[in-house]
């Protein structure tokens, strides 16, 4: 199977982005109405009931959500994840061809159609998601990346627009890292399965790409749908809402965006308890007027400054460690009788 041309990749990416808009403006209102009607056990006809079901005042009057809507309307990065996702599949096939040309034929060639299809799907949807998980984990644990990623977590109410809330640099780095890893893993899988996608695998991957957009929009909406045991294999809204909690017990939990397998593996899995309530936001000290990301400067400029400061600390620490390594041998060689602690102290 020949890889698609780059213009086709971009066109497909734009098509997928239109799917995101369809979820926001068509599918989501239907789901929100059905959820509210089920909870109230009646059909909703009154305008006040409809408004509360589709756009609750406490959600859409929240300053963070209004800011999310403005950023959503203005940002060009909406199309980036879709384009890079399709581009990763294109690059994967090119990488498989590169391996075949420079390494030679695969030592094991899996020609069975069903087996090849399964391997390609697992590579794309399970193993391929590991890169995104690792980058997301780093976004929470590494101060330099948290300086950017915390923008996404500073929202104090959830709406479908929150799915694309984030600093552009964080978004760019995330899709580049995730796409590069996916291209590498899928490329290796293709190398061992004939060099091209099977029709069934390509169909499943395309459906999963669209489903993930629906999933992202719903998981960031105010509707706390619970999928029950299905949350253990496919992330649902109530499961992902935990990830946006300001409570300490929920911190750095449920990092997997689509499937929770890596949360299981690395101990970040948290199954919400029935009726569990919590506050949304960075923490209890960064709410309302204390929220650092409720202005253009706080949303766009300050994270870059914080990123640069943390990066500078990292470079300074590395430079300091290098000076220690280069200094110690000479010091100990010329001052073997000098107390080692005294020799090292000025360098701390």
Image (spheres, rainbow, N blue to C red):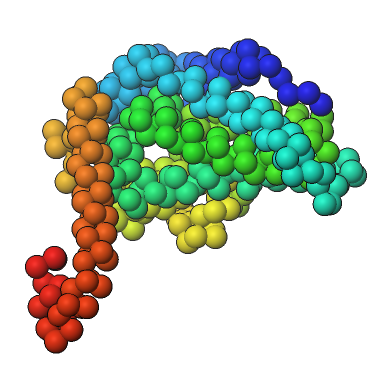
Asked whether, in this view, residue 303 is left or right of residue 170, the answer is left
The one nearer the camera, 48 or 107, is 107
Q: Residue furthest bottom?
A: 337
Q: Position of residue 219 (x, y in %)?
A: 48, 36
Q: Residue at (25%, 26%) from the top-left corner? A: 300
Image quadrant for the N terminus? top right
Q: Residue at (49%, 23%) from the top-left corner? A: 80
Asked whether, in this view, residue 267 is left or right of residue 187, the answer is left
Asked whether, in this view, residue 187 is left or right of residue 50, the answer is right
Image quadrant for the C terminus? bottom left
The one nearer the camera, 205 or 217, is 205
Q: Position of residue 249 (x, y in %)?
A: 33, 58
Q: Position of residue 108 (x, y in %)?
A: 84, 51
Please indicate, yes or no, whether residue 51 appears anywhere in the rendered image. no
Asked whether, in this view, residue 205 is left or right of residue 343, the answer is right
- Relative to residue 219, is residue 5 depicted above or below? above
The one nearer the camera, 233 or 45, is 233
Q: How many labels sit on residues?
A: 0
Q: Position of residue 180 (x, y in %)?
A: 55, 37
Please indicate, yes or no, whether residue 86 appears anywhere in the rendered image. yes
Q: Residue furthest front?
A: 334
Q: Residue at (33%, 39%) from the top-left corner? A: 149
Give residue 289's quadrant in the image: top left
Give residue 264's quadrant in the image: bottom right
Q: Residue furthest right?
A: 112
């Amino acid at each position: 199977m020949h890889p698609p041309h780059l213009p086709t990749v971009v066109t497909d990416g734009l098509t997928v982005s239109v799917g995101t808009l369809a979820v926001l403006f068509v599918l989501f209102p239907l789901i929100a109405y059905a959820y509210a009607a089920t909870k109230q056990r009646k059909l909703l006809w009154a305008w006040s009931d409809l408004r509360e079901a589709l756009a609750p005042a406490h959600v859409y009057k929240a300053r963070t959500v209004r800011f999310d809507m403005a950023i959503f309307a203005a940002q060009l990065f909406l199309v980036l994840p879709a384009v890079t996702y399709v581009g990763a599949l294109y690059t994967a096939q090119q990488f498989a061809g590169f391996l075949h040309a420079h390494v030679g034929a695969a030592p094991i060639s899996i020609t069975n159609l069903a087996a090849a299809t399964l391997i390609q799907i697992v590579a794309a949807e399970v193993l391929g998601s590991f890169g995104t998980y690792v980058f997301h984990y780093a976004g929470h644990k590494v101060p330099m990346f948290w300086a950017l990623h915390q923008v996404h977590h500073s929202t104090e109410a959830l709406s479908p627009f929150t799915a694309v809330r984030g600093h552009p640099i964080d978004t760019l780095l995330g899709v580049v890292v995730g796409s590069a890893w996916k291209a590498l893993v899928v490329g290796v899988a293709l190398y061992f399965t004939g060099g091209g996608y099977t029709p069934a695998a390509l169909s499943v991957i395309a459906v999963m790409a669209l489903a993930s957009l629906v999933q992202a929009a719903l998981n960031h909406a105010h509707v706390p749908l619970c999928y029950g045991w299905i949350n253990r294999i496919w992330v649902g809204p109530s499961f992902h809402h935990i990830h946006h909690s300001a409570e300490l017990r929920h911190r750095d939990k449920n990092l997997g965006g689509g499937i929770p397998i890596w949360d299981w593996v690395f101990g970040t899995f948290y199954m919400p308890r029935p009726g569990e309530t919590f506050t949304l936001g960075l923490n209890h000290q960064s709410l309302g007027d204390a929220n650092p990301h409720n202005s253009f400067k706080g949303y766009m400029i300050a994270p870059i400054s914080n990123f640069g400061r943390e990066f500078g600390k990292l470079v300074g620490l590395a430079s300091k460690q290098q000076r220690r390594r280069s200094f110690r041998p000479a010091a100990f060689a010329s001052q073997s009788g000098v107390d080692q602690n005294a020799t090292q102290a000025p360098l701390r």
